[in-house]
Amino acid sequence: MAQAALIVVVSRALGVFTRWLGQPMVIAEISAGILLGPSLVGWLWPGFTSAVFPTQSLPLLGLASQVGLLLFMFLIGIELDPKLLRGRANASMLGGGLAVPHLVVEGARPSAVVVTLRRPVPCDTPDAEPVRLLVAHVHPGGRGHTRLIARLARLARLDTTRALAGERDARRLVRELLARLG
């Protein structure tokens, strides 16, 4: 209980400073974790972290942090204005078992998530092939976005998608996907 109180007190104290800088409270909370963890105070005073946060208390703190993160993401979802996304979210059902949900956001850093589906999902694809592989991505738009969609369309051959969707090693899957996008 004292650990949680310390975390809250340090977070709130840093919150005063971050609000003065015009930053959200979550920046103060992240900063409190860095400050109290082994990165700063634990580095300056090595015994501090192990004394205040003993190893046996870490699973409970980990659980509390996961619940907190879940609630935080829930609140973000509640506050998300769907009007901001309207007209920017797209889904390309390319066929061959490949679906490419994508979002164009000006100024975004290109990022992607690759998902293999344990069971193929029937979807309205051009070849009526059920979806086995999702490549969801966010991109700032422009020619790079168009090129990526075109390269992913080349993957929409049934044999390629099946081979990629069957891969169980995530690193190998991403390496193989990047090699085929070449």
Image (cartoon, rainbow, N blue to C red):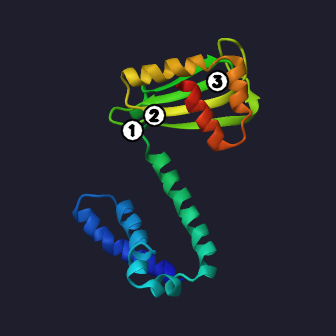
Describe the element under mark 1 as helix, strand or loop.
loop
Percent across and percent down for residue 119 are 77, 33
**Residue identifier under label 1:** 109
Q: Amino acid at mark 1?
A: Arg
Percent across and percent down for residue 22 are 24, 58
Question: Residue 63 got which mark?
Answer: none
Percent across and percent down for residue 86 are 43, 28
* Residue extending furthest toward the top: 126
Q: Earlier in the sequence, mark 3 or mark 2?
A: 3
**Which residue: 50% across, 17% down?**
150
Q: Is residue 146 above or below residue 165?
A: above
Quote the CA–CA distance across marks 1 and 2. 7 Å
Q: Amino acid at mark 2?
A: Val
Between 81 and 65, the residue placed more toward the observer is 65
Whether residue 101 sits left or right of residue 106 in the image: it is right
Percent across and percent down for residue 30 are 41, 64
Q: Is residue 26 above or below residue 80?
A: below
Describe the element under mark 3 as helix, strand or loop.
strand
Q: Are marks 1 and 2 in contact (CB under 8 Å)?
A: yes
Quadrant, the N terminus: bottom right
**Residue identifier under label 2:** 138
Q: Is residue 147 above or below residue 20?
A: above
Whether residue 176 sits left or right of residue 82 in the image: it is right
